[in-house]
Amino acid sequence: MIRWRLVYSGLLSAGMSGLVALIVTILNTGIDAGLVLRWLAAWAIAFPVAWFAALFWGPFARRLALRITQPPAGE
């Protein structure tokens, strides 16, 4: 189970941090020949932070989502 959690949170955080880093990089610096290198530099910082956050925030977010979406007992 721990391996699944590491892989799942790694894949999810890689995709999300990559997309956010790309959008923020484009908004801050524009699209030009150096975009890919600037984006990769930003993503190299964002990805480990996102993975760490996903590992620790994930279980809490799951419990919170279940609490919000499950009706009270007896309904």
Image (tube, grey):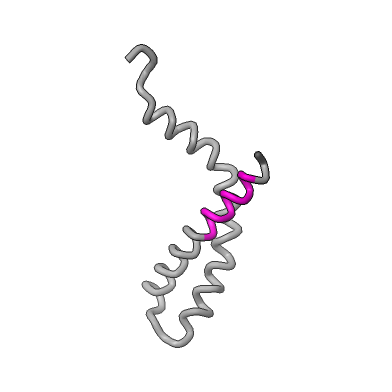
Give the x, y percent position of residue 21. Answer: 47, 66
Q: Residue at x 63, y 48 (%)?
A: 6
Q: Is residue 13 magenta?
A: yes
Compared to residue 45, the image places residue 72 above or below, namely: above
Q: Is the N terminus in the top left, top right, bottom left or bottom right quadrant?
A: top right
Q: Is residue 61 magenta?
A: no
Total numbered labels placed on residues in the image = 0
> Magenta segment, which residues?
4-14
Q: Nearer the viewer, residue 29 or 67?
A: 67
Q: Residue at x 41, y 68 (%)?
A: 24
Give the x, y percent position of residue 22. Answer: 44, 69
Compared to residue 22, the image places residue 4 above or below, namely: above
Q: Residue at x 49, y 79 (%)?
A: 36
Compared to residue 2, the image places residue 71 above or below, namely: above
Image quadrant in which you'd find residue 56:
top right
Q: Among all residues in the image, which is located at the extreme left?
A: 75
Compared to residue 15, the image places residue 3 above or below, namely: above
Give the x, y percent position of residue 19. Answer: 44, 64
The dominant secondary structure in magenta is helix
Q: Is residue 69 left or right of residue 61?
A: left
Give the x, y percent position of residue 27. Answer: 37, 72
Q: Nearer the viewer, residue 42 or 12?
A: 12
Q: Among all residues in the image, which is located at the extreme top?
A: 74
Image quadrant in which you'd find residue 26:
bottom left
Q: Is the C terminus in the top left, top right, bottom left or bottom right quadrant?
A: top left
Q: Among all residues in the image, which is located at the extreme bottom?
A: 33
Image quadrant in which you'd find residue 69:
top left
